[in-house]
């Protein structure tokens, strides 16, 4: 903690708080991923944290700012020989996605689901695909949040804002959750328990998702855990859901965020074009321009 304070010396209070928060978030992430000693830190921990921030949908500018503080902190540790210099031997290049991650192709979704061979993982990944929940929201669920009879989940506080919302459960998710609830440890409070009565950590969930991506031979597509949320939005729009309803399901305060987040796919544009053109070709357009 003293090292962090030294790094922040001479900075404005606001900048100091921002740098302190970034470093603490990184250290907490490493701890949740199983690191118990800072001297065991590796470059992969830094790369995993970057991926975690991207999967959470953080702005590019936010990630860059956090990385600047974290890298300065790591240099401080290297100077004191607390961690090896190999952690920062090569420049960290942020592989930043487009404004938003891509949606998974429907055929790829089917391939992914087909290779999931464990009950817990199937329940978790289907939950993400069918509800549009953020990975952090799904991992933080407790048994009391789920109502299988009414086929809904109550999110009393959103991960990125204080808005509560309800998401609904499709038939395949209900079936997968029932199977998982039938074998999970009933003494654990979290739906997807991890170690020491806590929730499953992000890195473990991400590793399982990427394991199945490789098994389905989809690793070249660049899919991440957060793609499940974008896939959910795109599929519902293609199925005809109104933007205002999707906004509530995703938990967006501003509908413009939903409009940007759930971009219409080529299939939707194609269908809309030919539907409108059929009317035009039949002479169904009247009036002056």
Image (spheres, rainbow, N blue to C red):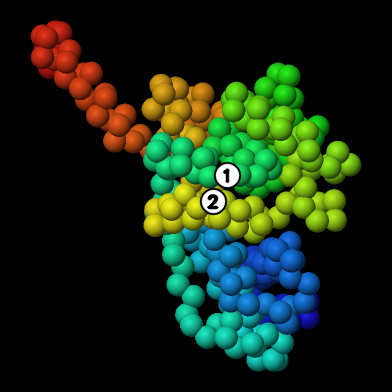
Q: Are marks 2 and 1 in contact (CB under 8 Å)?
A: yes
Say whether residue 31 is visible: yes
- The foreground one among 50 and 69 is 50
Kindly give the residue lying farthest to the right in the view shown: 187
Q: How many other residues sit within 10 Å of disc 2, few (<14), some (14-19) or many (≥20)?
A: many
Residue at image coords 48%, 82%:
90
Residue at image coords 52%, 30%:
247
Q: Is residue 45 above or below residue 184?
A: below
Does dot 1 land on a helix, a strand or a loop? loop
Q: Is residue 206 left or right of residue 284?
A: right
- The foreground one among 90 and 149 is 149
Q: Determine which of the numbered discs, if any, sits on residue 201 in the image.
A: none
Name which quarter of the figure residue 44 lies in.
Answer: bottom right
Q: Position of residue 37 (x, y in %)?
A: 77, 77
Q: How many other residues sit within 10 Å of disc 1, few (<14), some (14-19) or many (≥20)?
A: many
Residue at image coords 57%, 44%:
116
Look at the image and tell me in which quarter the N terminus lies. bottom right
Q: Is residue 38 left or right of residue 64?
A: right
Q: Determine which of the numbered discs, if any, sits on residue 116 in the image.
A: 1
Residue at image coords 44%, 65%:
95
Q: Is residue 190 above or below residue 74?
A: above
Residue identifier under label 2: 212
- The foreground one among 101 and 115 is 115
Say whether residue 224 is visible: no
User: Nearer the N terminus, badge 2 or badge 1?
Assistant: 1
Q: Position of residue 61 (x, y in %)?
A: 49, 61
Q: Position of residue 94 (x, y in %)?
A: 46, 68
Q: Position of residue 35 (x, y in %)?
A: 74, 70
Does dot 2 land on a helix, a strand or a loop? helix
């Amino acid at each position: 903690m003293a090292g962090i304070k030294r790094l922040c010396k001479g900075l404005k209070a606001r900048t100091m708080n921002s740098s302190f928060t970034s470093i603490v978030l990184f250290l907490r992430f490493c701890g949740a991923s199983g690191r118990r000693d800072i001297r065991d830190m590796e470059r992969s921990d830094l790369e995993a944290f970057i991926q975690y921030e991207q999967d959470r949908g953080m702005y590019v500018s936010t990630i860059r700012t956090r990385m600047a503080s974290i890298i300065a902190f790591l240099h401080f540790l290297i100077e004191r020989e607390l961690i090896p210099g190999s952690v920062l031997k090569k420049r960290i290049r942020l592989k930043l996605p487009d404004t938003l991650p891509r949606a998974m192709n429907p055929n790829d979704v089917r391939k992914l689901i087909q290779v999931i061979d464990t009950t817990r993982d199937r329940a978790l990944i289907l939950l993400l695909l069918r509800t549009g929940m953020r990975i952090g929201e799904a991992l933080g669920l407790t048994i009391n949040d789920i109502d299988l009879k009414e086929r809904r989940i109550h999110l009393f506080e959103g991960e990125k804002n204080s808005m509560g919302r309800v998401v609904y459960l499709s038939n395949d998710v209900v079936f997968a959750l029932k199977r998982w609830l039938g074998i999970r440890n009933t003494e654990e409070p979290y739906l997807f328990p991890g170690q020491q009565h806590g929730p499953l950590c992000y890195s473990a969930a991400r590793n399982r998702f990427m394991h199945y991506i490789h098994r389905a031979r989809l690793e070249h597509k660049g899919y991440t855990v957060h793609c499940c949320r974008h896939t959910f939005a795109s599929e519902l729009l293609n199925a005809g859901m109104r933007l205002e309803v999707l906004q509530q399901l995703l938990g967006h305060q501003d509908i413009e965020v939903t409009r940007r987040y759930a971009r219409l796919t080529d299939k939707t544009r194609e269908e809309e074009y030919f539907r409108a053109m059929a009317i035009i070709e039949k002479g169904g357009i009247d009036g002056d321009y």
